[in-house]
Image: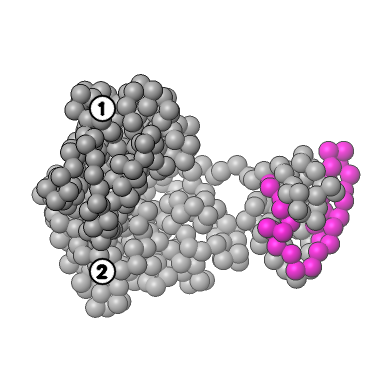
Amino acid sequence: MSRLRIRDVDPFSPLFGYVRPGWTLVSVNEQPVEDEIDFRYKISEDRISIVFANPDDEELEFEFEDIDAVTLGLTLDDRKIKLCKNDCIFCFILQQPPGMRRTLYLKDEDYRLSFTHGNFITLSNTSDSDLERIVEQKLSPLYISVHATDDTLRRCMLRNERLAPIVPRIKYLTDNGITVHTQAVLCPEINDGAYAEQTIRDLAALHPGVESLAVVPVGLTRYRDGLAKLRPYRPDEARRVVAQVEAIQQDLLAELGTRFVWPADEFYTIADLDFPGESTYEHTPQFENGIGMCREFITGWHRRKRWLRDIQTDRRILMLTGTSAYPFLSRHCLPYLRDQLGLRVDLHAVTNRFWGETVTVSGLLTGQDLLRHARQHESKFDLLILPPNCTNDEDLFLDNLTLTQFRQALKKPVVIGHYNLADTIREAVASDSAVVAA
């Protein structure tokens, strides 16, 4: 097994001055170390012995008692990410053009990232020894993409004939104390209907080990040449999915004390249905997967909008969003901003020309689409507010356009909003430069 390279040593580490960047980690208590997670697990014993090697392969041993990874202060070059070997009929990675952020082309299928970052995996390249390690090191919770518990259908959808049956693998994890959150990406007339009900029931039978299930509509871009023939959900079909899942929720609430399964917010927007009440989402176990985000936004808006009563500005404000969020934003927020506060605010839905009109969420709007729309209406606003999820932590849009380049091209104040719209409006109006942190 190859060794882990030391990238950095914290100046406050007891190893500082003894171990240097470029050295390698040989072993902990005479056991090789696979990655950062394995390292943290193996140094959790009361007494440990760590062996390092310098570039000349000379080894140096240190012994510690009751020490943790933070105190040791080592930054390790971790193992390469395990990549997905499936060829899913709905894979979003395969539906992207060149020129995007590099990370968007990474098809990860790594249980370690599922544990540390909440990434969904299929367990397709998770070996039996990996499962044993997950249990031994208590890597919980994990996030697993199931899509269908009918194994023949699942193999067809993932186009991988070597897939092991999914329910026994999940049961092994849950029987050994691992909490699992699951998702099913539904494709019209493929894994919905009776197949979806079977998937929900099979996974609910593993509750509480399987804690939740998200039902998500397939996302399709215009870059699908040579890919499987799929189509998006129609409103009437989305309404049937929501009705089916909500009926099962009531059964499971009586049986298990939890609704267990939730349709993604996008199903409600496609169906043009009101979102359920806040309590319906319980403790929102899959919030980051688009379950309950819209309800949280609406609830937060109604709780905080009174903070804006003293707002005064003559600036004309334009807010941009995706076509899926436009209906509830215009229904819940605009009337108050305009009629109650008298603000000169407008809201526009931006068509996603980059990926295609079937991609409707604001988080997949590119800088060029947002900029093009803003330029078309630049005579009608003085201040532009962009969605909170259209840039990353480095202020980079999906198409590698920077926020600085966006502002320079538009030559008008631009704000990246908060998920809390009341905070966004207040800070934007109060800021002389109209540059608000995301």
Q: Secondary structure at mark 2?
A: helix
State whether residue 354 is above or below residue 348: above
- Nearer-the-camera pick, 386 or 154: 386
Q: Residue at x 40, y 67 (%)?
A: 210
For label 2, count other residues whose C-alpha is less than 10 Å away and answer few (under 14), some (14-19) or many (20+). Answer: few
Residue range in magenta is: 49-76
Q: Secondary structure at mark 1?
A: helix
Counting residues from the start of the chain, the first of labels 1 and 2 encountered is: 2
Q: Is residue 83 left or right of residue 409?
A: right
- Nearer-the-camera pick, 413 or 356: 413
Q: Residue at x 76, y 49 (%)?
A: 11
Residue 136 place in picture, x, y as percent: 60, 66
Residue 107 place in picture, x, y as percent: 46, 40
- Please, what is the three-letter code of the amino acid marked with disc 2? Ser
State whether residue 68 is above or below residue 158: below
Residue 416 place in picture, x, y as percent: 36, 39
Write down the quadrant of residue 365 in the picture.
top left
Residue topped by disc 2: 279
Q: Look at discs 1 and 2 and give the one toward the viewer.
A: 1
Residue topped by disc 1: 374
Q: Is residue 255 visible?
A: yes
In which quadrant is the C terminus drawn? Answer: top left
Residue 74 included in the magenta stretch of the image? yes
For label 1, count other residues whose C-alpha is less than 10 Å away and answer few (under 14), some (14-19) or many (20+). Answer: many
Q: Is residue 121 visible?
A: no
Residue 400 place in picture, x, y as percent: 43, 28
- Please, what is the three-letter code of the amino acid marked with disc 1? Ala
Q: Mark 1 and mark 2: span between their CA atoms?
A: 37 Å
Q: Residue at x 74, y 64 (%)?
A: 67
Residue 281 included in the magenta stretch of the image? no
